Image: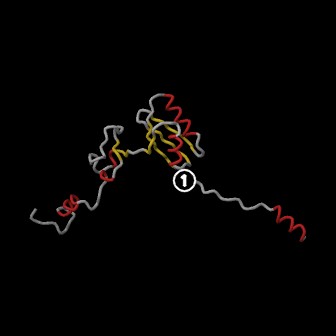
Amino acid sequence: MGYLDHISDYCSVTKTKKHKRKNMETVEIKVKMDCDGCERKVKNAASSLKGVKSVDVNRKQSRVTVKGYVEPKKVLKKVQSTGKKAEMWPYVPYNLVSYPYAPQAYDKKAPSGYVKNVPQAFHTPNSPSERFDTIFSDENPNACLIM
């Protein structure tokens, strides 16, 4: 039995590395596309990545949406390798922003219903205007009763 145990140590299956599974992600990229050929080239490049489940190209909005078990930086690099100017999707829906006409948020080139994703457009809790609004609010028990 000692001899068989000794041989089985050499023949045993070694532990394999457990690969961390990537999370399912939705990556949105802004890509300037002019024709069907550009659209096809970008779609083929994005779908060739390992882990991609679906690629949706919207030429009218210059938007590519990639869903799958991928890293956003790798998708962006792959799309840029086609020779097209590409960047991460810089817009957020209009209804999610507190101040859509804040400086640098309103963009004429943005698709309808979207504004740029800038910090000035979102609600800042310590802004002076909010402090004055809450001072005279009905919910504030210390508000002036003369008003």
Q: Is residue 1 above or below residue 125?
A: below
Q: Position of residue 21 (x, y in %)?
A: 59, 54
Q: Position of residue 61 (x, y in %)?
A: 41, 36
Please give the residue where the numbered disc 1 appears in the rendered image.
Answer: 23
Q: Looking at this rendering, what residue extends furthest in the left direction? A: 146
Q: Is residue 100 above or below residue 137?
A: above
Please name whichever residue, 80 or 93, is drawn nearer the observer in this view of the structure.
Answer: 80
Is 60 left, or right, of 130 in this rendering? right
- Name the residue at 30% across, 55% down: 123
Is 49 left, or right, of 104 in this rendering? right
Amino acid beneath label 1:
Asn
Is 3 left, or right, of 39 in this rendering? right
- Label 1's element? loop
Q: Residues within 10 Å of mark 1 (few under 14, many from 20)?
A: few
- Name the residue at 55% across, 38% down: 45
- Name the residue at 27% across, 48% down: 103
Q: Position of residue 87 (x, y in %)?
A: 44, 43
The N terminus - image quarter: bottom right
